Amino acid sequence: MTNLVNLLDFDHAKLITYCRELGEKPFRAKQLLRWMHRFGVDDFHKMTDIATSLREALITTSIISAPVVISDHISSDGTRKWLLDVGQGNVIETVFIPEKNRGTLCISTQVGCAVNCRFCSTGKQGFNRNLLAGEIIGQLWMAKHALLAEKNDQKITNVVMMGMGEPLLNYGPTVTALKLMLDDNAYGLSRRRVTLSTSGVVPMIDKLSQDCAVTIAISLHASNDALRDNLVPINKKYPLHELIASCRRYLKFSPRDFITFEYCMLDGINDSADHARELIVLMQGKIGELSLPCKFNLIPFNPFSKSGLNRSSDLNIRNFARILTESGIVTTIRKTRGDDIDAACGQLAGEVKDRTHVQERMKKMLQYQALNF
């Protein structure tokens, strides 16, 4: 089994290459895509319009394998969270959020996360490895066909890469999965309905604009570099002026005419009126520059143990939103979903065999502080 090729790892172009290696013509790739992704078939025997010779070849060389579901939890508000086994004791999480006119699937791209944002429980779990393309698209494959089998009229209309991990630090597999989401022979989603959230890996934002320009959302959470260095450590490498400049460049290729900024509201940390005013200046840019068309999504912090952080008050969040709105920035306050099953934004943790030893390092740091202060 270990020598078999997982066909979920291939987008259309890669599947054409693989078919050629088996001595088959390119149109077979389109047939395989439809059977796998559109119809959810993982048994080559059932692919009835594919030549018997190819089916026999695939049986001996290939598999169609998505991550295995360990558990399936449904929140009181209808949000659904799957725990998925990705091997060697590692578990990732995938969340489906049903709404009246849409269904959004939040998928993971890494086992854990190395970015280690202060307000995100995933980062506190540490990092083990990047997911393969088949493990990323396999979350959509699993969820789509699980919902279809239940015949409850729930459909996935939108996908957001906002689960565990930083998508742009797992660039190749992420882009392969994106191309499958957009492929009419697979899932046929619009570029406007696929959103990649990034903490700000500037070179990869530029690369994505050329390779597969979907909608992006920037995990911002701070109005100045000193604060963002503390909350989102990757800012030390790609500071705000570089990040905002990359957003301006990306807009030339984006399917939307604005950039969404996500902003986690932390009590006494980043939620003052002065912070809101700093954001307005940041979006305006230098003298002579056009302001950056944008939308702010304010996210009430979802607490988790040992974070040391608290959620901003409803009053502070509303005042923050009012200041941004009065400046002309479209601003929304995200409704918390699935927090009773730890499926809300920032709560996804899974089970990670951490090879970065985050928790061990934190423990040593606390011991050091206790001895020296």
Image: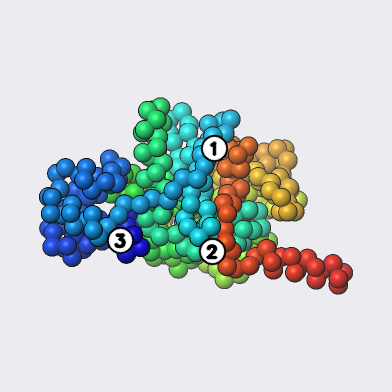
Quadrant containing the N terminus is bottom left
Q: Is residue 108 left or right of residue 298?
A: left
Going by the numbered disc 2, the residue's amino acid type is: Asn
Q: Which residue is mark 1?
A: 73
Secondary structure of the residue carrying tag 2 is strand
For label 2, the crowd category at 10 Å Cα-Cα, with few meaning under 14, some 14 to 19 and many 20 or more, is: some
Establish if 264 lies above or below 332. Answer: below
Residue 22 in sight from this viewpoint: yes
Q: CA distance from mark 1 to mark 3?
A: 32 Å
Establish if 59 lies above or below 327. Answer: below
| Residue drawn at (17%, 62%) of the image | 22
For label 1, the crowd category at 10 Å Cα-Cα, with few meaning under 14, some 14 to 19 and many 20 or more, is: some
- Point out residue 310 in the picture as x, y percentages from the top left corner: 73, 47
Q: Nearer the viewer, residue 171 or 354?
A: 354
Quadrant containing the C terminus is bottom right
Q: Which residue is mark 2?
A: 128
